Image (tube, helix red, strand yellow):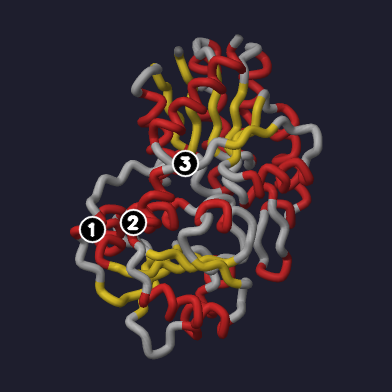
Amino acid sequence: MNIYFAGTMQSTFIQQDADLLSENHKLTIFDFSKHAASFSNIHNFLIRAFFEWNNVRKSDIVILWFADYPALPFIIWAKLFRKPIITHVGGWEVYSAPEINYGNQLNPIRGAATRWILRNSTVCVCMSEAYKQIITSCEPKSRVRVIPGWVDINCDVIKLQKNKSVVTALISIKFTNLLKGIPTFLKSTLGLNAKVVENIPHEDLIDLLKKTRVYCQLSYTESFGMTLLEAMSCGCIPVVTDRDALPEVVGDCGYVVPYGDVDATRKAILKALESKDMIKSKHRALLFSKERAKILIESLLKEVCE
């Protein structure tokens, strides 16, 4: 199958999806991170996108990562050439949280663009049941399918030497401190061996997680939590908030606390530090396997291309 794949390829999990698809299909890739990195460069992006019409025409299906304005020209080309469209929704596109200045739906124009994309995609894909409900609320006419995130980390957690440390991770964007619950993390871990991990190479992050006992994801909202899943694959005991997809990912292998509750979070972290149940975290993470994701993706491709 010939797949036209447009997305932000600097994101590890998007590159991971492209690599998975390329195992069985031929991909033509348009990298948003190169051509649509900023709204100020929109004219150059539109020129580049215009000349992609023939690549879209020659494809069997168009797959887009994310439901924001860079997807618009590719939706138009796909519809002109009657190609099925799968649009992956990251989460930010359909969210509205004015209290932390987060979500595309806070912007009337970009929010409307997202809703148009959702309506005009053959199928929208998200990574959790929680966000399926959010997408449907944002655009009731969207057709949403859940394909959970996945990791492919092979390590024997029994042999790992875990120290009594706690980490959380974030990227440098203006709203991420509150979004990722960093103030709560800092207050909850006073006096502990704790660290906020920010913008390190992916390989270094995995090495750190293999040595860490507790991983915290204290977010205001998450559509899934890829770093959380990676931490669980490395045998970290998870402490997460009760928001959206996080309890879905953790299941019964960690601790769930209210967002922003410092006392409850600290108590959960202290319990997690004493826990030695790394195997339970690893087994939970194994449910989100590459093999499972591949079956779901191939099934969806077959369905939309029939």
* Quadrant placement of the N terminus: top left
In this orientation, does residue 34 appear? Answer: no
Q: Residue at x 48, y 27 (%)?
A: 5
Label 1 to label 3: alpha-carbon separation: 36 Å
Q: Which residue is mark 3?
A: 8
Q: Which mark is residue 33?
A: none
Left or right for 139, reference 121: right
Q: Amino acid at mark 2?
A: Ile
C-alpha distance separating marks 1 and 2:
7 Å
Residue 184 lies, with reference to residue 56, above or below; the image says: below
Picture residue at 50% right of the left edge, 26% below the top = 297
Q: Is residue 190 left or right of residue 162?
A: right
The answer to which of marks 3 and 2 sits earlier in the sequence is 3
Give the residue drawn at x 30%, y 46%: 153
What residue is disc 2 on? Answer: 279
Q: Amino acid at mark 3?
A: Thr
Label 2 near label 1: C-beta < 8 Å? Answer: yes
Residue position marked by numbered label 1 in the rendering:
158
